[in-house]
Image: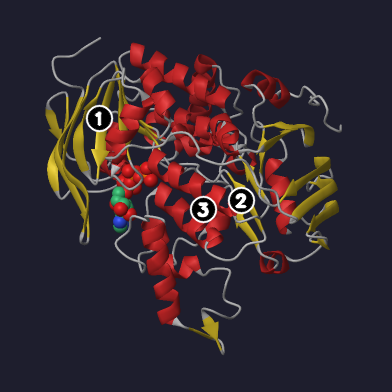
Amino acid sequence: MTTEHSSLELRGITKRFGALTANDHIDLEVRAGEIHCLLGENGAGKSTLMNVLYGLYQADEGEILLDGVVQRFAGPGDAMRAGIGMVHQHFMLIPVFTVAENVLLGHERALGGLAGAKQKVREISQRFGFHIDPDAKIEDLPVGVQQRVEIIKALSQDARVLVFDEPTAVLTPQETDELMAIMQQLRDEGTAIVFITHKLREVRAIADKITVIRLGKVVGEASPQSSSTELASMMVGRPVELTVQKNPPVLTDNTLEVAGLTVLDALGQKVVNDVSFTVRGGEVLCIAGVQGNGQTELTEAILGLQPKASGSVRLNGRELLGKSVRDVLDAGVGFVPEDRKVDGLVGEFTIAENLMLDRYQGAPFVSAGTVDRGARDEFATEKLGAFDIRAQGIHTNVGTLSGGNQQKVVLARELGRPLALLVASQPTRGLDVGSIEFVHSQIIASRDAGIPVIVVSTELDEVVGLADRIAVMYRGGVVGVVPADTSRDTLGLMMAGERHTPEGAAA
Ligand SMILES: Nc1ncnc2c1ncn2[C@@H]1O[C@H](COP(=O)(O)OP(=O)(O)OP(=O)(O)O)[C@@H](O)[C@H]1O
Ligand SMILES: [Mg+2]
């Protein structure tokens, strides 16, 4: 289905934040019945552009046209009424509200109250094969399901333009496939779709059109037939190494020994069940598995964040289990948490403040109870450069940074001090390909410095690229620890619960 005009046209959109031009005269056309991918580095201006479209920001220059007619959106309500729906990069759902209440929010009149909202949730769920209870509370739902609620909310308005801002960052591969099928179905019904993702495989699988943005400007269109390497270099403006570069591991005497680790949740269920493994200094153990199989609780137990943990976690012979988080960090454990917004950063603090967040206890940043601003700012400036954090400066609030740049602040802090052990959960979630290359090289540098490294990842590419050995978790247990060159098919079966013991290895 095509219309005479582009369904959506953005003309010369410019958006400034103080001295920073996040969008610089951007032109973009999205037709009905087309999936249009927006590709660009972290901080390139993708979310900003979509927030302008959705009425969350007012453009400084430029105009938005729907079917050739100029629109004025004073807020998201106007955009929604004009038929624009958006699935946001950072969820905008209210955790203590139910699914139906969240869908109703802002659409009270159109949906005809809560009963209408519930009906709508059921209708859309049925149509797309979601299993969602309209009365479930958001905070009780796993992220993959929350993502579906965002989608239902966007669809409940019969949007003719739908924006998906990095919806797959928190989804499992299977959920991703399902979402892509939904997008294709909507496309075939004539919806104009904008799809933002950093996963080039997804772009290549689904895009009808690709526009690349760099530093707030459109740098060109790419063909959906382009290779990942071509897309990556167009995006970043230089060739990018898409495979992890590393030498064979050189093992040291440093050791992390996890033995019989069991973690109970609030209801007394075993979310980590009798897990044992050893990681030597100089190697990366990747923990693979579908999200929600105990990986989060396992890493949190190592950090001292799980009160109901038993067994033992010994770092170089010293027991960590039962210690406070403070003591664990002081023992030199670096931790990259899975959800940077909850555990990693304080949005209202500046980059410089966030970089010393767990280091208020003394040298080098604090002496006699006062912060040495000079030392702090020097450290922050160095990290800003080293980690290529795109921000106006070290005194910018972390909450205003793009998703990928927030992640880089966490990494800069955790990798920026002497470590005895590194535990990184989903370290590259939301990062662009250039940043992933950098973060992987930093993780390998920690490994090559001779410390044990644990990386939890649901991305098989990342696991296979980084790991020296792979532990696969399923329903709280480790179903096997296998060499890095194990086939993806075998890993896939293990992720579905099949036990596997490589030949010649101790069970
Ligand atoms: N509310 C705001 N105040 C100040 N600066 C902002 C604000 N929102 C975004 N920016 C800045 O605008 C630039 C573009 O950010 P944006 O979030 O659009 O990037 P993005 O392309 O979506 O990146 P990512 O892939 O990391 O999500 C960044 O430098 C960001 O710090
Ligand atoms: Mg973004």
Q: Please give the name of the residue rendered at 61% of the width and 44% of the height, measured from the top-left corner.
A: 139
- List the residue tagged with mark 1: 211
**Residue 349 shows in the view:** yes
| Along the viewing direction, whichever of 80 and 474 lies nearer the viewer | 474
- List the residue tagged with mark 3: 341
| Along the viewing direction, whichever of 404 and 94 lies nearer the viewer | 404
| Along the viewing direction, whichever of 481 and 428 lies nearer the viewer | 481
Between the residue at mark 3 and the residue at mark 2, the CA separation in whole angstroms equals 26 Å
| Along the viewing direction, whichever of 192 and 457 lies nearer the viewer | 457
Residue 209, image quadrant = top left
Which quarter of the figure is the N terminus placed in?
Answer: top left
Looking at the image, residue 223 sits to the left or right of residue 472; the answer is left
Q: Mark 2 or mark 3, which is nearer the start of the sequence?
A: 3
Q: Please give the name of the residue rendered at 69% of the width and 20% of the height, measured from the top-left corner.
A: 490
- For label 1, being within 8 Å of ligand 1 is answered no
Q: Secondary structure at mark 1?
A: strand
Residue 472 horizontal/vertical position (percent): 72, 32
Q: Mark 2 or mark 1, which is nearer the start of the sequence?
A: 1
By what rule are the colours in the image chosen? secondary structure
- Numbered circle sitting on residue 49: none
Between the residue at mark 1 and the residue at mark 3, the CA separation in whole angstroms equals 29 Å
The crowding category of the residue bearing disc 1, from other C-alpha atoms within 10 Å (few below 14, some 14 to 19, many at least 20), is: some
Which quarter of the figure is the C terminus placed in?
Answer: top right
Residue 444 horizontal/vertical position (percent): 55, 47
- List the residue tagged with mark 2: 447
The amino acid marked with disc number 1 is Thr
